[in-house]
Structure formats: C-alpha cells, structure tokens
C-alpha cells in the first residue's frame, strides 16, 4: 500500500489520536467519567481504539480506509512528475 495520508490530515490524526488514547485510558482507569455504567466503558474503549488507529495512520502515513475510498492527501511526488523526470517512483 502506498502512502496516502499527509498534510493537515496527518497533523489532525497526530493530534487527535493521542488525545483520544489519553481520554480512553483515563476513563478506563477511573480518572475521568464520560458516561455511567456500560455506556461509559463502551465509549472509553471506542476512544482508545479510534485513537490508536488515528495515531498509527499518522505515523505510517497509510490508511486502508482512505485507500478503499480513493482518498489521497499525501503530498509526495505523483507518478506523472517522476515519470517525466525519468526516475522510477519511490515506494
């Protein structure tokens, strides 16, 4: 899979991912109450998982959902730019 996450998309993921991880972990540890009972547990786990996915996709710059939807925010050279320069595209 080629890189497809960059620019503001990557910055947003890099900021929101760790924030959601901290919120989810704090809620599971009992330092923060999001909602009472099972709902709070579900929201905390969801925040933790979504945060982990966002942080991972920010670091790797690869998002399977972006690939599936055809979204590419990566600011690297495009295939036409590298082909016109006579150089193979870097992977």
Image (cartoon, helix red, strand yellow):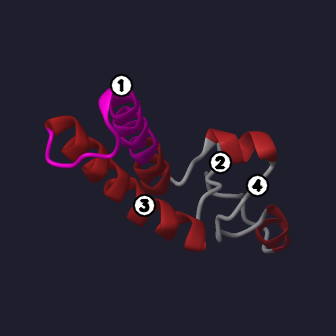
Q: Magenta span covers which residues?
A: 30-52
Q: Which residue is mark 4?
A: 71
Q: Which residue is mark 1?
A: 38
Spatial CA distance of label 4 from label 1 is 35 Å
Q: Badges 4 and 3: C-beta atoms under 8 Å apart?
A: no
Judged left or right of residue 47, residue 10 is: right
| N-terminal label among 2 and 1 | 2
The residue sitting at 80% across, 62% down in the picture is 79
Question: Closer to us: mark 4 or mark 1?
Answer: 1
For residue 38, side relative to residue 58 (left or right):
left
* Residue under the point 70% across and 58% down: 89
Disc 3 vs disc 1: which is toward the camera?
1
**Is 16 inside the magenta-drawn segment?**
no
| Distance (Cα) linking label 2 and label 1 | 39 Å
In this view, the residue in front, 84 or 75, is 75
Residue drawn at the location 36% of the way across and 52% of the way down: 20
Query: Is 75 situated above or below 55?
Result: below
What secondary structure is the magenta-colored segment mainly? helix
Q: Position of residue 51 (x, y in %)?
A: 40, 47
């Amino acid at each position: 899979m080629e890189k497809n996450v960059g620019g503001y998309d990557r910055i947003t993921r890099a900021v929101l991912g760790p924030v959601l991880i901290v919120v989810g972990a704090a809620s599971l540890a009992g330092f923060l109450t999001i909602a009472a009972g099972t709902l709070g547990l579900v929201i905390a786990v969801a925040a933790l998982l979504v945060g982990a996915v966002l942080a991972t996709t920010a670091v790797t710059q690869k998002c399977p959902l972006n690939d599936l939807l055809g979204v590419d925010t990566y600011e690297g050279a495009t295939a036409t730019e590298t082909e016109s320069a006579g150089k193979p595209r870097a992977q």
